[in-house]
Amino acid sequence: KLTERLGDPELAKKLTMLQLQEYFHNLEQKKGSDCLCPLCGSTHWYIPASPDSIEHPLILTMPIPAQKGIGIWVYPIYCKECAHMILLEASQIVKHFVDAGKL
């Protein structure tokens, strides 16, 4: 099933820095302007790399209360000016690239 594949950690780990940058850039293009940091107004964002490979973005796990061992994977993106962080839910980005035949 596609929904099971989208939750597969191996697919999320295959996403590259370039793909996540492309995804973020496409969101900005759809909006028609650069993404502004809600705290400081900067448009300078940073995608941290995985400790295992600079070619892949860092993945964080957000635990689900009362669900031992279960969490949601997210890709963090930080504002370079004030360190505000936005989180992009991994399975939605994986779905985008699976649907496009790029993952």
Image (tube, rainbow, N blue to C red):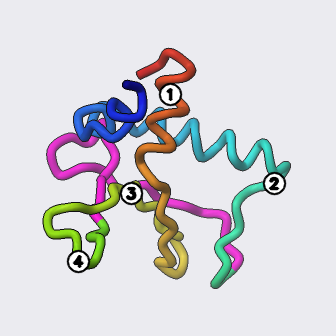
Q: Secondary structure at mark 4?
A: loop
Q: Secondary structure at mark 3?
A: strand
Q: Give the mark toward the camera: 2 or 1.
A: 1
Q: Give the mark toward the camera: 2 or 3.
A: 3
Sequence order check: which comes first, mark 2 or mark 3?
A: 2
Look at mark 4 in the image and give the residue it sits on.
66
User: Residue, x 57% and y 36% (percent of image)?
Assistant: 22
Number of marks drawn: 4
Look at mark 1 in the image and give the residue it sits on.
97
Look at mark 2 in the image and give the residue it sits on.
33
Magenta stretch: residue 64 in it?
no
Sequence order check: which comes first, mark 3 or mark 4?
A: 4
Are circles 2 and 1 on residues that touch, CB within 8 Å?
Answer: no
In magenta, the rendered stretch is 41-61
Sequence order check: which comes first, mark 4 or mark 2?
A: 2
Q: Give the mark toward the camera: 1 or 4.
A: 4
In the image, residue 63 lies at what x, y percent? 26, 70
Quarter-of-image position of residue 12: top left
Q: Amino acid at mark 3?
A: Val
Residue 71 drawn above or below residue 102: below
Q: Nearer the viewer, residue 16 or 44?
A: 16
Q: Amino acid at mark 2?
A: Ser
Look at mark 3 in the image and give the residue it sits on.
74
Instruction: Specify whether 37 is left or right of 95.
Output: right
User: Residue, x 48% and y 72% (percent of image)?
Assistant: 85
Label 1, label 4: how far apart the Cα atoms are:
31 Å
Q: Amino acid at mark 4?
A: Ala
Label 3, label 4: how far apart the Cα atoms are:
19 Å
Q: Nearer the viewer, residue 94 or 82?
A: 94
